Every structure is written in C-alpha cells, then in structure tokens.
Image (cartoon, coloured by chain):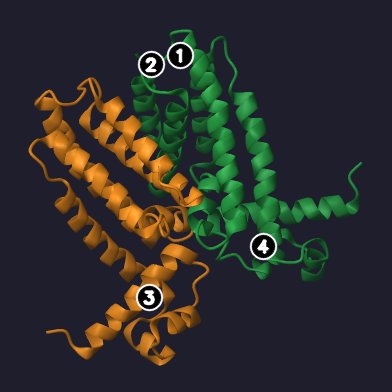
Chain colours: A orange, B green
C-alpha cells in the first residue's frame, strides 16, 4: 500500500515533470514546485535534497513509463505492423497534449546535454534502449521481407528515432501535427523496399 | 565603422550565445553573462532591457548566420551534390565543436517551445526557411533524376531537417559523431531511387 510519504513524493514528481517539460529544467525553481504541487517547501526538501535530485527522479520515472509505452505500442500481427502501430501511438500521444511538452528526453537532451553528465547519461541510455528495441522489430521485418534490407537494422532503427525526435520538435514549435505526421509518412515510404 | 557600443553589444551576444547553447536559456543568469563577457552589469542593461531581449537578439543573429551557412554549403556541380555538400558541412561544423552546443534552434525549440511564443515563432520561421531552401534543391535533383521522385519535395525536405536535428540530438548526448554520421548515411540511401 502507498504510504502518505509515497503520495507526497509522487505529487512532487508529477508537478516537476509537467514544469520541466513545458518551462524547461533551468527555468523551474523550487518555488514553482511549491506553487504547482501545493506542498510546503519543507515537505519537498524532506523528500529530495534539491532540484537536481528531483530532475533525475523525474527522468528515471519517465524512462520506465516510456519503456512500458514502447512495449505496449510495439504490438501487431507482424513485425512491420508493430512498427506502424508504434508510429501511430507516438502521433496519438502527442495529439492528446496538443504538442505541449513534447518528448521529455529530447527536451532534456538539448537543455542539459552539455551541462550535466548525469542527465546526459540517462538520456543516452534511453535512446540506446529505444533504438535496440526498435532494431529487433526492424530486423524481424527485414527477415520476413516486409522492410528494405539494404540498410543494417541498427542504422534504420536509429534513423527512425531521429525522424521521430525531429518531427516532434517541429510539431511542438508549430503547435501543429503536420510536421510529425508528414515525417512519419515519409519514414514509412523510405522503409519500403 | 563599428563603434565602441557595437563592440560591447557583440561581446554580450557572443557570451550569451555560448551560454544559452551549452547551459540553456533558463539556467543562464545576468550574472553569468557578467562573468562570461567581463562587462559590468550596467553595461549589459544599457544595451538590452533584460535576458529575454538578449535571447531574442541571439536567435536573430544565429538565424542570419545559419542562412549564410546554408547558402555557402548548398554548392556543387548538381542539385544532389549541393545537398551532399550541405550534409557534410553540417557534420564538419559539429565535429569542430565536439558536439558541444549542438543546434541553437533545436535547443531553444525544445527549451522554450511552450513557454515563450516569441522564441517559438522565430524558430518556426527558421525551420520553414530551412525546409524551403532544401526543397528547392530536392525538387531540382528530382527533376534531373538524381533523387527519388515518389515523395513530394517539401515532405522530403522536412524529413531531411528532422533527421539532421534528431541526429545532432543523439550525437550531442553521446558526445560521439556516430549517431549523426549514421543518420546522414541512411538519409543518403533513402533519398536514392
């Protein structure tokens, strides 16, 4: 059963995730967290030594939920249909937020990639895990003749992640689904034989 | 001739560009700018009303220099070779910095895309101008039979920008040229007939 402490911790992480994703990590203060969570400052510091620790905990939690999202999305009657389903789920996920927030890993990668090694390391691992997962389905689809096989599976998988991150970036700036949708359509075409 | 004021302004923008690109806009304070530029705080406020104005001026300057970079890079004996040359120039530009900093537009897109409309607007325009410029060469290459023509030029151009931004993101987090290099190689292959 969740204790009162667990609930408070989750409240802090929920508010932090939202603020980091929309305002950025650097622009979020502990006072913003107090306002957004409705908790006392002392209660926040009781659970976390400071903003960095909250940021790292948010990233770890987001990594776990993204891995669940990946596993849930990569489903279908054939390896290629699993990939298609994943693309559509990415689109749906961002349509639901109106492209506010975008991808927490991409955002943090570009905000903190140079300034904090601990953040960069987690994000690098997330990208590697994501690519490895996609690669399995790409290779299986190639073996079944569903996908072009003149490019190694790992390189195609990395390309898929790059297109998705770039597409989310452009859709987020435009607050319009068109860039991501178009990028995913081109991606589908370029994966064909 | 540049006045003393022009030189001071440039000094502020130079320090700001470096700090915004590596630390992020939100995490950079006016005191950081004082330290990095060696100027007095009063001198900074004489030239700019505040950090937002400095950020917007940095973006405008970066937009101009990126458009020059695009024009200089898109050169070669055929439209497709112009694109190839551009890809290689992007790689070289980031190799020179060791993937510190990355793409200022991508970084700011993901840090400020939701929180400040003025920033988001400039970046959206930069992406649109960039895509339009690439599209011209894509269409010319398609007409010459150098490039696949089963995907509209505008969609292919957007895809190129997405792959580059995603590739820079992954290389920056890894501090390794491999992701961007691989993404560009897959891009070349997928552009072929």
The reply to whether callout 3 and callout 4 are in contact (CB within 8 Å) is no
The answer to whether the residue labelled 1 contacts the one labelled 2, judged by CB atoms less than 8 Å apart, is yes
Residue B190: percent from left, percent from top: 34, 23
| Residue B41 located left or right of residue A109 | right
Residue that appears at 36% across and 55% down: A105
Q: Nearer the viewer, residue B122 or B76?
A: B122
Distance from label 1 to label 2 (Cα)? 6 Å
Q: Is residue B155 above or below residue A34?
A: above
Q: Are marks 3 and 2 on the same chain?
A: no
- Location of the N terminus of chain A by quadrant is bottom left
Q: In which quarter of the image is the C terminus of chain A?
A: top left
Residue B20 visible, this angle: yes
- The chain that hosts pointer 2 is B
Q: Which of marks 4 and 2 is nearer the N terminus?
A: 4
Indicate the secondary structure of the residue bearing disc 3: helix
For marks 3 and 2, give the CA distance: 47 Å
Give the number of the mark in front: 4 or 2. Answer: 2
Mark 2 neighbour class, 10 Å CA radius: few under 14, some 14 to 19, many 20 or more: some
Image coordinates of residue B135 in percent, x first then y, are: 52, 25
| Among the two numbered marks 1 and 2 on one chain, the one whose residue lies closer to the N terminus | 1
Q: Nearer the viewer, mark 1 or mark 3?
A: 1
Q: Name the residue under label 1.
A: B142
Q: Say which residue appears at 81% left-offset and 70% top-offset.
A: B42
Q: Which chain carries label 4?
A: B
Q: Residue beneath label 2, please?
A: B148
Q: Which residue is drawn at 37% across and 69% down?
A: A17
4 or 1: mark nearer the eye: 1
For mark 3, does the 10 Å Cα neighbourhood hold few (<14), some (14 to 19), or many (20 or more) residues? some
Tag of residue B177: none
Residue B98 vertical position relative to residue A9 in the rendered view, above or below: above
Q: Where does label 3 land, which residue?
A: A15
C-alpha span from label 3 to label 4: 25 Å
């Amino acid at each position: 059963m969740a204790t009162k402490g667990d609930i408070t911790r989750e409240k802090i992480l929920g508010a932090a995730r939202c603020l980091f994703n929309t305002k950025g990590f650097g622009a979020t203060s502990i006072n913003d967290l107090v306002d957004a969570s409705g908790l006392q400052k002392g209660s926040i510091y009781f659970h976390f030594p400071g903003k960095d620790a909250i940021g790292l905990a948010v990233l770890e939690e987001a990594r776990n939920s993204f891995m669940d999202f990946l596993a849930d999305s990569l489903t279908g009657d054939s390896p290629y249909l699993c990939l298609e389903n994943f693309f559509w789920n990415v689109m749906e996920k961002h349509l639901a937020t109106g492209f506010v927030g975008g991808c927490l890993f991409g955002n943090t990668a570009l905000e903190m990639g140079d300034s904090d090694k601990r953040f960069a390391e987690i994000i690098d691992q997330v990208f590697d895990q994501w690519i490895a997962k996609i690669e399995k389905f790409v290779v299986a689809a190639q073996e079944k003749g569903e996908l072009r096989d003149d490019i190694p599976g790992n390189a195609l998988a990395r390309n898929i992640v790059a297109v998705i991150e770039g597409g989310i970036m452009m859709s987020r700036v435009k607050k319009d689904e068109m860039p991501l949708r178009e990028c995913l359509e081109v991606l589908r075409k370029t994966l064909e034989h």
